[in-house]
Amino acid sequence: MPRQKFHRGKWELQRERGRIEALTPPPPDRPPLRLADGIADVLKAIGPPPDAWMAELTSEWPHLVGGDVARHTRPAGVERQVLLVYVDSSVWLSELQRYGQKKILANLQQRFGTDCVPALRLRLDPDGGRR
């Protein structure tokens, strides 16, 4: 940004008349920022709210993991940047840990990105699958 040029005597007069304490004049006026641009930048910086992301994940769960798997699993939340998925029986838990976990994670990362879903952990559902 180019350095602002100002007339020192004129600024001293304005400071005295306006009782301004600053020793240097304010920076020059810049063109106004569009509100839409500012909001987009702020939203990008803070990211989506966790509840909105989980609501979207829950609604799309059957399409992302398949009908059979969706009947026995549910997304439970995020713990230390790891998506926690509850499985309703130990048989399904074992099968998914061996054969399905990587595919589920790949589908979720393809849909939401690796930043949103860096890892996946499968656990036995504490409710016993009663939803």
Image: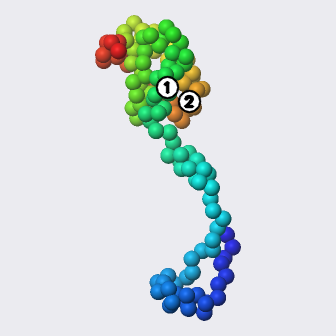
Q: Which residue does the image show at 66% across and 76% down from the upper left? A: 3
Q: Position of residue 15 (x, y in %)?
A: 52, 87
Q: Nearer the viewer, residue 121 or 53?
A: 53
Q: Position of residue 17 (x, y in %)?
A: 51, 90
The answer to whether any part of residue 26 appears in the image is yes
Q: Nearer the viewer, mark 2 or mark 1?
A: 1
Q: Residues within 10 Å of mark 2 (few under 14, many from 20)?
A: some
Q: What secondary structure is found at the residue carrying circle 1?
A: helix
Q: CA distance from mark 2 to mark 1?
A: 9 Å
**Label pair 2/1, CB-CB below 8 angstroms:** yes
Q: Which residue does the image show at 63% across and 71% down from the upper left? A: 29
- Label 2 sits on what residue type? Phe
Kindly identify which residue carries mark 1.
57
Kindly identify which residue carries mark 2.
112
Q: Mark 2 or mark 1, which has the lower sequence index? A: 1
Q: Is residue 27 above or below residue 72?
A: below
- Label 1 sits on what residue type? Leu
Q: Is residue 38 left or right of residue 3?
A: left
Quadrant assignment for the C terminus = top left
Q: Residues within 10 Å of mark 1 (few under 14, many from 20)?
A: some
Specify the quadrant of the image occupied by residue 30.
bottom right
Q: Which residue does the image show at 58% across and 47% down from the upper left? A: 40
Q: What secondary structure is found at the residue carrying circle 2?
A: helix
Q: Position of residue 28 (x, y in %)?
A: 63, 74
The answer to whether any part of residue 122 appears in the image is no
Q: Position of residue 10 (x, y in %)?
A: 61, 90
Quadrant assignment for the N terminus = bottom right
